[in-house]
Image: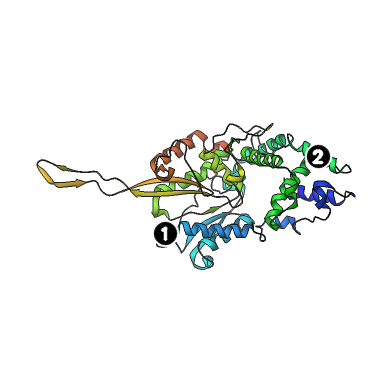
Amino acid sequence: MGVAEMLELFQHIRHANTTLTGDLNFANDWDFFTGDPSADFESLTTTGPYAGTLEAFGTGVKLRTRYEKLLEKPGARSNTSFWASDSPRVIETARYFAAGFFGLDWADKSAALHVISETPDLGADTLTPGDTCAKYRDDVDDFGHELGARKLMEFRSSYLPAIADRLQEQNPNIRFSESEIYSMQEICGFETLVRGSSPWCDVFTHDEWLSFEYARDVIHYYRAGPGNPYGATMGWLWINATTNLLNEGPSAGPFFLSFAHDGDILPLLAALDLFPDPPLPTNRTLPNRLWRASQLVPMGGRLIIERLTRPATRHCWNNAPLYPNHVYCEPERDDVFIRININDGIVAVPGCDHGPGRSCPLDQWTEWVEARGRELGEFKDVCGLADGAPDRITFLHQ
């Protein structure tokens, strides 16, 4: 679903030659929330309390505050590389974030933004593996990119017809299709981002909104999340590259910032296997599920992998009773731990949360990532790429 379907709904209402009543009475005078949909839908929103520009800048300030000590390290405020996939709104997000994180003059002296193409020829060396995994992208089997859309259609048919009947009782001269009613629900969110509120939000009951929430969970779960056989393999690329950096430690650099689409965060979550739900059914909702797109990939959603250190316990001994005054101690060293932060919530690694703050020791984390990679299979093989295609991410370095 997207801008085309919303515009079709708008035109249907405008040319219906009927006065809408009941829950849709407001739509008689309602106008579309953007004058240039084809352009505006590819850019960050710039108005309203939920504007994408505000969210990105605010997130930069928030993380600058949280990780201020990393910014104080030598060289951290100069010549720092960060990355964005080659999409206008992703690049805009990265720039507004950088202004909040590094400062308004970041482009002059603080950091360098590198744009990574979204073209298919990059193979595994990408931020957008959904564009380079050939079997997934081209839907060569039943489990490619369109799996999510098919599952969404299945579930939509379980709750939208009743809404269509209710609205037609109020407006006998017009009938709305399932696609149009689903667009009404989508407009609520889009218009709220632009204008701060939307009358479309009041058309639906609480239970109908719960169904829409679940519909969004279903499409994300099966399009690139745990419900898609390609999802975790695509996400493991970035997890593995990041794990290599975590093992290098501070010498690699204080932080690595990457920006991509919400659909590129979902495979990372699938690779991490943090939300072990049963497969989401499409004939009913699963009320107690862990997989909720509104919490995992909201606007400005983020996944942070933190590297934590603390002094290790030192063991000392002497050679008493012969030399009781000669004390020997192990060399000083740090214990290193990894912690997962998703949208400001700490999520434990399955079976490895016994470190401080529900973290996982680095060596165990590394073993887990390597084992997960063997379980999922090589990206090139799973995705059906040519022998000469890149097989790993190479650009993540300072």
Residue 397 visible? The answer is yes
Residue 69 lies in quadrant? bottom left
Which class describes the residues within 10 Å of circle 2: few (<14), some (14-19), or many (20+)?
few
Question: Which amino acid type corresponds to the residue marked 1 in the rendered image?
Answer: Lys
Which class describes the residues within 10 Å of circle 1: few (<14), some (14-19), or many (20+)?
few
In the rendered image, residue 210, in percent from the top left (x then y), is placed at 67, 40
Question: Which amino acid type corresponds to the residue marked 2 in the rendered image?
Answer: Arg
Q: Residue at x 51, y 40 (%)?
A: 272
Q: Which residue is mark 2?
A: 166
Q: Quadrant of the N terminus?
A: top right
Residue 2 visible? The answer is no
Q: Nearer the viewer, mark 2 or mark 1?
A: 2
Callout 2–callout 1 Cβ contact below 8 Å: no
Exactly how many numbered labels are in the figure? 2
In the rendered image, residue 113, in percent from the top left (x then y), is placed at 54, 59
Q: Earlier in the sequence, mark 2 or mark 1?
A: 1
Q: Secondary structure at mark 2?
A: helix
Q: Nearer the viewer, residue 25 or 158?
A: 25
Q: Which residue is mark 1?
A: 69
